[in-house]
Amino acid sequence: MRVLLVTGSSGGHIFPAMALMERLKAACADVLMVLPKKNSGSKIASGPEKVKYIHGSKLGLKSGSKNIIGAYFFLLGAWEGLRAIIAFRPDVVVGFGSLDTVALLFWAWLFRIKTVIHEQNVSPGRANRLLAKFADKVAVSFAQTGDYFNVSPGKIVLTGNPLRKGLVRTDRKQALDFFGFKEGKFNILVMGGSQGSHKLNTVCSAALSGYQKRDDLQLVHIAGDMDFAMLKQAYAQAGIAHKVFSFFPDMQYAYSMADLVICRAGATTIAELGRFAVPALLIPYPYAYAHQLENAKVLEESGAALIVRDEELCVDKIGCSIRKLMAEPQKLEAMRQAHSRAQLKDAACLLAEEVLNLN
């Protein structure tokens, strides 16, 4: 069976596609990953054995020269996508959202190739709302997402958001040893998504550096490239036990050592927090149609996380929230238990079954 996977350029699109790829290859499927050219050489897109890069584009709602250029690259990417379909001859095409997937899913529908789309967020983007009308199956990560699609209920399947097979909890001591950390301290993981977040980075580093009992803390901060040097210097000057990374692929160690995660609320992050049952302070990214706020509300309503809105994000707010949670271990335990109650089955396996059953 030949399966073509096509995604947008962000980690939130690529990571679940790579998790599905792992499961499909284990079932002896022949898998081709199609990615936007901007991901060529990217750290977040490393791994696929068979990959084709095509031109991507951004098309806004307003007219202008940027949209003319965007339309050109969209059509160029559509032509490249058509050539990929003709050369690979897939039995199923799976799309993971964004404008970069639209043309290729359209070609698949035109050639009567079976199609699946996967929506990572609670509130779907415009591309998947459009493509749902043509897809054979619409896989969703949250039960609430089905209400956003104007399709027959039988087309929608709740799979959850696929995560890599190796992303499983390790022994806490082993995770602490991995970072050279000591036992008996409060461990924090800070991260701003696959691209990093300058605002989150600067506010969190200032809040943690100003904490009076710095000897009680150990932290891992995944910063992105832009703020890496700045954060290393800030934590070194503050005297906090820390590890700073621009990008960190072995997230199982970071989640396994963490007592608290401070992060954005991308769909992959939400799924990972659930798998590792880690309490979180979520600062949803305020743009991109507020997808992240809807994701964060699911965890907050279950009791597994607290939300700090981006407009409220400041040193005092983060510092106060951290101190409160550190002083209430029973609250942190209740947040961990809330994650455990909401666990789904292995999303990658469920999605792989849906794909394989279409053939």
Image: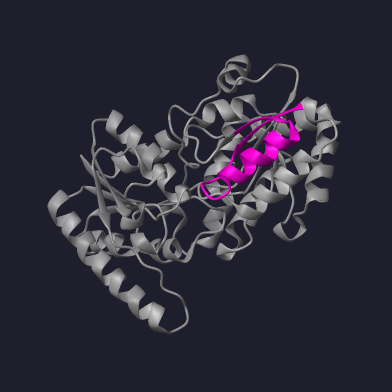
Q: Quadrant of the C terminus?
A: top left
Assess whether residue 234 is covered by the magenta stretch: yes
Q: In this view of the protein, which residue sits in the foreground, 183 or 11?
A: 183
Residue 210 appears left or right of 56: right
In the image, residue 135 above or below residue 358: below
123, 33: nearer the viewer = 33
**315 within the magenta span:** no
**Image coordinates for residue 351, horizontal then vertical, percent:** 40, 40
How far from the left and from the top, in percent, is residue 129? 45, 64
The residue stretch that appears in magenta: 217-243
Q: Residue at x 45, y 39 (%)?
A: 162
Choose between 282 and 234: the one closer to the eye.
234
Q: Residue at x 60, y 35 (%)?
A: 274
Residue 171, horizontal then vertical, whole percent: 59, 16
Q: For residue 219, what is the image quadrant?
A: top right
Q: Position of residue 78 (x, y in %)?
A: 25, 66
Q: Is residue 73 above or below residue 271?
A: below
Residue 279 visible, this angle: no
82 vs 59: above or below: above
